[in-house]
Amino acid sequence: MRKFADDFKAFAVKGNAIDMAIGIVIGAAFNKIINSIVSDLMMPPLGLLIGGVDFKNLQLVLQAAKPATDAAPAVAEVAIRYGMFLNSIVEFLIVGLSAFIAVRVMSRVMQARSA
């Protein structure tokens, strides 16, 4: 058990582990920013352009909700929420493009240093 603790301590204080932890924290914060950009800045004007549609509410209802009665309990709505899926696709594209640009810039900087 002592060896395990020593190995973990060596791993935790290595530069790579600390860099990874910082990257995860920054990534989580970046994710919130991207979510806000997509949900609050991009999708509302896009929805307005295509007829005042709120993408968050786009769904295909498979079964409507039914309120409870004396004879039966309430039944929840069953729906495919494709509007939220569209938001997720736009978020993914923004994150992917951002990562691509960052890697491309870093690659060019590394090439310039080695030349």
Image (cartoon, rainbow, N blue to C red):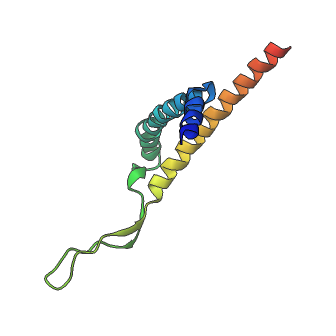
Of residues 35 and 19, the one nearer the viewer is: 19
| Residue 41 locus on image (x, y percent) | 43, 35
Residue lying at 51% horizontally and 48% vertically, measured from the top left: 88
x and y percentages locating residue 94 in the rendered image: 57, 38
Q: Please, is residue 47 above or below residue 57 in the view?
A: above
Find residue 112 and report its image quarter: top right
Work out whether 28 lies above or below 18. below
**Is 72 positioned to the left or the right of 23 in the image?**
left
Examine the rendering and report whether any part of residue 53 can be seen.
no
Q: Residue furthest bottom?
A: 71
Task: Report the side of 97 relative to 30 (left or right).
Answer: right
Residue drawn where x is 70% and y is 23% of the image: 105
Which quadrant, please, contains the C terminus?
Answer: top right
State the image coordinates of residue 81 (x, y, percent, origin top left). Answer: 43, 60
Q: Position of residue 15 (x, y in %)?
A: 61, 24
Residue 58 appears in view: yes
Left or right of residue 72: residue 45: right
Tally of numbered discs: 0
Q: Residue furthest right?
A: 115
| Picture residue at 21% right of the left edge, 74% below the top | 67
Q: Residue at x 59, y 42 (%)?
A: 93
